[in-house]
Amino acid sequence: MDQLTVPARWAARWHLTGAGVENVWLFPREVIDCPSGRILVTGPNGTGKTTLLEKLCPHLLDPTAVQNLSSGKNRGTTLESLMKTGSTGRRRVGYVWLSFSPPQAGPEAATLTAHYGLRLDYAQGTNPAVVRTAFTMPVVPGSDRDDLSVLSIEAFTQYVTGHSGTVFDRLDDYVSDLAERVFGCPPARLQQIARRIKKLRNPGLLGELTPTQAEQELHGVLPRVSPEVLHVTRQALAAAEATRARYTQAEKTAALLQDLSSAWLHSCARTVLSTIDDALEHSAAWRRAQIEAEEAEARAATSAHRHQELTALVAGLDVLEREKNSRAQALEQDAASSDLTRAREKADLCTTGHQQAEELLLARRAAAAAAAEHLDVAVAGVREVMESVARTCAEAGVPGPVAFPVHVERTEQAPVAIGGRDFGTLTEISADLIPGTVDQAVSALEEAEHRQHQRSANAKVLVLAHHGVDEAQQGGNQARARADAAAEAAGMALTRHREAHQAVHATVSELSGAVQRWAVATQAAVRAPGFDLATVAADAREWPLAQEFTGAVRDAAALAGRVTALAAGFSSRARQRAQHHQQQAVAARPGVAGDGRRQRLLRHGRRLAPGRPASRSGQGHGGSGHGRRRSALRHAVSARPGRRQRLAGAALGPGAAH
């Protein structure tokens, strides 16, 4: 606070040098120093400037007057309202005082500063609600202890008297002592001064007057105040009017910027929420497609397992047929040792078993055809699911799977003929899945092979008996015919084997070309870290050159597994980004809701909740009033952290043309 030089006329009389308040209204403790005798309190609206002056002056000059402290018709300030506001219980004790310094010359020059005040004891539900106890003491109340509000009336009396002070029994005694000692006048004169000060502080007195008219009215109310002081007051009022106009314009500008900020935040929140909804929708679609793909892969694996089982059974029967021919040749060389009767009985049993085996083979062949159809349906379902996943990933903006995880290969085998019955041509269908699925299929094949060995052992006995009967019936002359037929069948089998090998070579060559084309297209369109597509294409070119095609099938299955794993990684990162956007939206919603509430309050003309009450004292007049009000505005703005940044950001947002 800037201090002005004490006027010379005050050197020979007592004058105001300070004030204080403790535990009254919303003030915990405020001590105001004013060596010049002038108190100027600044701050935003609603922080208690008028309330502070109402409980200090003129109330402390004449506390015997009515307890209504209001300085205008629109205010209802009372001692009870001051003590009740800010109270946390049914009892409360507070203090207010004025400080007066003695003359600088004369017999009272060595006198200490006198502090005149009131102790306010508030009790809810009593009459009167506030009991006032007047006192005077030479030290600032509470300057040598932490809290005066905890002292009882007896302890407070001891505290005052211990500092050479006085606690007055009656308020009239307080007024008489203050009038005679400080003002040097009768008590009635001091009470008249208090009434004039209260009239002067009425906001309606100068509300609709020009600065010149206000100077004239003040001269009529305070005829003994020097014209120079009134002239300076007129200048201060004129400067305050200009400052008030600028504050009004600044308030309108702040309201406009607040509206722009709210509109911008609302637009940003709407955009973020829309983006998050789209991301969540795509993520849900991707999860549904992934579940469908897993179900289709499970169905395809089951169908492939059944088909491999049937293929192994057919192959076992073919082996039995070849063993039967070799056994027949052996029996032809040892025909003399056979018993014709027993051979016929065994032949009948073998014929019956052979017919049952043929019926079982027909049933298994029908089951194999049905399994092949199921496999085709499952593969088509997997392909449809993969296409759906690719479309969903493309809509979500993330890389999708680029390869089909199931490799299906069809091979036409040689016609199956047992005895004189032709079972037609069998088709071998193989479906290669990811390495885990292949391992499961291998385990199932080993179990099926074990069962088939047991069946082959039983069939060998039947074949031996059957050929024994044929040997006995046909004789040795038919042995050569059988040998010729066997040689012809072997030649036909060799021819079919060569044709099957050529067909497999053509299929592997076609698969190699497809993989090479896929690698070139993917390398040009998709970035795949850790995936060497050039090496993949080079390996695929070597597949048709191998003598055996098992390695090519295994490499193709491994390639499908790597592509599927890469697609799963891309999908996982897409889910993480969607979750991250969702968390940002959830974190932004409380701020948007708070801004919406503040916007509604401003739209309905309500003021935002004020900051902590603040009071500032100063002195001076004339042009200094403008600087003090500008400082108060800065204090009001700084009381709301983050608001200045939001206002500045709103000027760049949508709706700036408003």
Image (cartoon, rainbow, N blue to C red):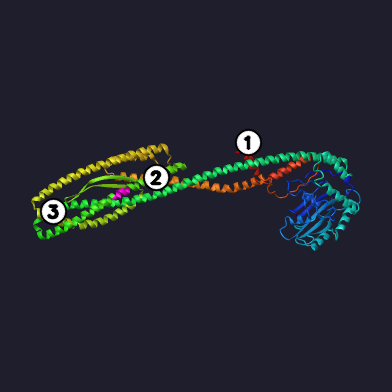
Between 598 and 520, which is closer to the camera in this rendering?
A: 598
Is 88 left, or right, of 408 in this rendering?
Answer: right
Secondary structure under tag 2 reads helix
Q: Give the labeled residue for mark 3.
A: 330
**Badge 1 or badge 2: first in the primary sequence:** 2
Identified by mark 3, the residue type is: Ala
Question: SS of the residue at dot 3?
Answer: helix
User: Residue 411 location, x and y as percent?
Assistant: 27, 45
Q: CA distance from mark 1 to mark 2?
A: 50 Å
Mark in the foreground, 1 or 3: 1
Depth check: give the residue in front, 525 or 163.
525
Gap in angstroms between the C-alphas marked 1 and 3:
107 Å
Residue 263 in the image: x percent, y percent? 61, 42
- Measured along the vertical axis of the image, is residue 211 above or below residue 153? above
Give the residue at x 73% y 57%: 87
Instruction: Identify residue for label 1.
Output: 657
> Disc 1 on helix, strand or loop?
loop
Q: Mark 3 vs mark 2: give the one in front.
A: 2
Neighbour class for label 3 at 10 Å: few (<14), some, many (≥20)?
some
Give the magenta-colored segment's residue range.
370-375
Q: Is residue 592 left or right of residue 577?
A: right
- Counting residues from the start of the chain, the first of labels 3 and 2 encountered is 3
For the residue marked with disc 2, what is the amino acid? Met
Residue 571 appears left or right of 377:
right
Which residue is identified by label 2?
A: 386
Residue 145: x and y in percent read 76, 57
Q: Is residue 639 left or right of residue 588?
A: right
Q: Quadrant of the C terminus?
A: top right
**Quarter-of-image position of residue 139:** bottom right
Q: Is residue 354 magenta?
A: no
Q: Nearer the viewer, mark 1 or mark 2?
A: 1
